Image (tube, rainbow, N blue to C red):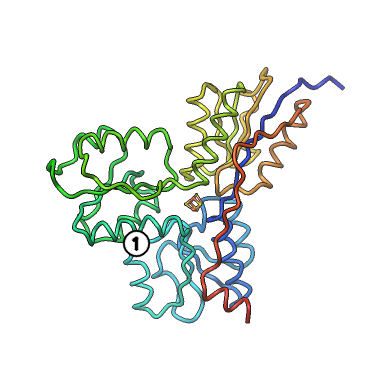
Amino acid sequence: MPTKPPLRVVLCAPRGFCAGVVRAIEVVETALKLYGPPVYVRHEIVHNKHVVDALKAKGVVFIREVDEAPAGNAPVVFSAHGVAKSVPERAAARNLFTIDATCPLVTKVHREAQAHFKRGRKIVLVGHPGHPEVVGTMGQLPEGAVTLVATIGEVASLPFSPDEPLAYVTQTTLSVDDTREIVEALKSRYPQAAAPPVEDICYATTNRQEAVKRAAAQVEAFIVVGAANSSNSQRLREVAEREGCCIALLVASATDIEWARLEGIRSLGVSAGASAPEVLVEDILDRLAERFALQVETLTTATETMAFPLPRALREGATA
Ligand code: SF4
């Protein structure tokens, strides 16, 4: 049997599931236990096919809009990304039983935007157009109250006058470095713009990016496990690339790895986005071990203890 080439693997910690994702999945699983299938979930509960497929197998039905849920008592769950106000309103108009799995850190951003609006400020939201979290945050306020910017160039073309009352909030899963630059441009153009009391980019996004940054500086190539539509996973891949890994792959699972691109490498960083289960990372390590003689080390840059309680209705139901 030919000798396998050696490969040093730097495994980032923290990686994978964040407290918001753990809670969202627990919300759906608890609803299944308490009320039985079917449980309807509007959009992917979190951006991960593995998680979505596992829930489908347990009797979860994923829908695009609440209008697709039949009348009756079956629960309709809103995803971790949050929803526009019109969504629970439409569900209430049909007397649907809804459960909100929005991550509390996204809800915090919704509340900030609402508070600024009450104080008469126009709101600039830094985020990616079309992302469900952005749609949900913009939908907390009447049309025109929130202006979305995604780049420094868009800050330059904002239509506000220099003394207009303004505030900014951000999507929770952005690149820490890019956002800093956009916010600096915004503050330099509008020094009066009120800032979030605490950073809107969440702890999980920040910690995972920091770990990837530190690991990427030591390795030739990087694998981030996560879905292509997962914002925080995409950002991790970009961080690795920027830190000098010319091979920085985002893969949904081991089957997506382009092995030819890893030929000849001696060191590899591995991380996972906040919605990617650890089982996918383990599977990738197994696949790597078939081709390389692995020497795995963990690079820990933060210890996470964050946990969010379930929505009250489910807590009470579970206790009963
Ligand atoms: S990535 Fe952050 S904001 Fe999004 S669900 Fe996880 S903890 Fe919440």
Q: Amino acid at mark 1?
A: Ala
User: What percent of the width, then of the height, locates residue 315?
Assistant: 57, 74
Name the quadrant containing residue 14. Answer: top right
How many discs appear?
1
Q: Quadrant of the N terminus?
A: top right
Q: Is residue 260 left or right of residue 232?
A: right
Whether the residue carrying mark 1 lies under 8 Å from ligand 1 is answered with no
Residue at the right extreme, as displayed:
1
Q: Is residue 217 left or right of residue 232?
A: right
Q: Is residue 214 left or right of residue 229?
A: right
Q: Quadrant of the C terminus?
A: bottom right
Residue at 46% across / 77% down in the picture?
97
- Measured along the vertical axis of the image, is residue 308 above or below residue 180? below
User: What percent of the width, then of the height, locates residue 264?
Assistant: 67, 17
- Measured along the vertical axis of the image, is residue 116 above or below residue 317? above
Residue at 63% across / 58% down in the picture?
54
Q: Nearer the viewer, residue 46 or 146?
A: 146
User: What percent of the width, then of the height, locates residue 265?
Assistant: 66, 19
Q: Residues within 10 Å of mark 1 (few under 14, many from 20)?
A: some
Q: The residue tagged with tag 1: helix, strand or loop?
A: loop
Residue at 60% across / 45% down in the picture?
16
- Measured along the vertical axis of the image, is residue 76 above or below residue 64? below
User: What percent of the width, then of the height, locates residue 126?
Assistant: 32, 44
- Measured along the vertical axis of the image, is residue 93 above or below residue 234? below
Residue ID for mark 1: 84
Residue at 41% across / 69% down in the picture?
66
Name the quadrant containing residue 261. Answer: top right
Residue at the top extreme, as displayed:
264
